[in-house]
Structures are given as structure tokens and as C-alpha cells.
Amino acid sequence: MLRTLDAGLLRVEQFVIGILMIAASFILFVNVVARYGFNEGFAWAEELTRYAIVWMVFIGGSLAARNGAHICVDVLSRMLEGQPVRKVLLVGVDLLCVAFSLFMVWIGWDLTAQAREFGQVTPVMQVPLWTIQLAIPVGSALMAIRFFQRALEQLKGGKAGSIEEIPG
């Protein structure tokens, strides 16, 4: 079941990030051509690109958690190489990251709910701000899942610091 969840999440995360990256690149390219070629740019282009990047960052945080690519200080972990206590340390760190990610879900959800309650909209596009801020709880929930997966992988004796690659 974990493998199926991992594979499904991985495909969705990669697809969404890919679409957002292509869309942001295309919008910026078209805006630059319009601005410099026709002396007329699109006011909404930079704002839309900024919000696409916000979503990319939070979903990308989940991918980074899956692959053990978040920034870390691993001096203690390296010193404990080959010792059983190292597994306890790595699982503990992953569970601490789960707790922090869940805290971010809670804070992000509260922020999103406030933006929705007050009817806040983005400056140029006039899109409800909560749709942008929803990236915080969604991305954080995905990160919590990924850190939990890593902790389970550690407990099962898997490769230290990352989930085994999915064939395909």
C-alpha cells in the first residue's frame, strides 16, 4: 500500500510541478516578447508566474522530503555511521519533520481560512487569495506524508535518508 501511495503521489507531484513550470515559462516568455516586441506587456503575467512558483515550491518541498534533499546538518549522523543508534536518530528527525509539517498545515489552514473569510483577492488578477495560500497546507501535508514514509523506510531498514526508487 505504501508503494502505491508513493507512486501515485510521485506522479501527481511531478505532473503538477511540470505543468506549472511550463506554464510559468511560457507566460513569462510571451510577456517579454509582448513587452519588448510590441511595447505592451500583460499586467497579470508576473503575478500569475509568482503564484505558480509558490505552488511549485510547496509541492517541490514534498519531492525534496521524499528524496532526502532538504537542507540538513548531518555531522552527528555521519559520526554514528554503522551504529544502531543512527537509525533512532534518523527516525526521530523524520518524525520531528512530520510534526513541524503538521504544524505548518494547521497554520497554513488558518491563514487560508482568514483570507477566505475576509474575501481577500490578489492585487492585479483579483483572484481569491486563499487559492494561492492553500499551497501552504497542501504542500505541508504532502511533506508530512513524505517524512512519515521516510521514517517507516528507516524502521524497515531501507536506504538511509530516502525512499527506494520506484521502478518505471
Image: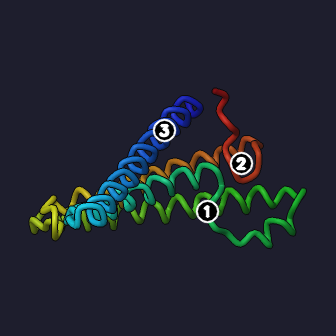
The local secondary structure at tag 3 comes to helix
Q: Residue at x 38, y 49 (%)?
A: 20
Residue name at image x 90 percent, y 56 percent: 82
Nearest the eye: 49 or 134: 49
Q: Is residue 89 visible?
A: yes
Q: Position of residue 141 (x, y in %)?
A: 42, 53
Asked whether, in this view, residue 137 is left or right of residue 168, the answer is: left
Q: Which residue is mark 2?
A: 154
Residue 143 coordinates in the image, percent (x, y): 49, 54
**Which one is in front, 157 or 23?**
23
Which-is-in-front pick, marks 2 and 1? 1
Marks 3 and 1, how far apart in space? 18 Å
What residue is pinned by disc 1?
70
Task: Choose the circle earlier in sequence order: 3 or 2.
Answer: 3
Numbered disc in front, either 3 or 2:
3
User: How far separated are the C-alphas under marks 3 and 2?
Assistant: 19 Å
Dot 3 or dot 1: first in sequence order is 3
SS at circle 2: helix
Q: Position of residue 44 (x, y in %)?
A: 21, 62
Contact, mark 2 vs mark 1 (Cβ under 8 Å): no
Quadrant containing the N terminus in the rendered view: top right
Q: Residue at x 71, y 48 (%)?
A: 154
Sequence-first tag of 2 and 1: 1
Question: Which residue, given by chain and number where applicable, does mark 3 sit on?
Answer: 9
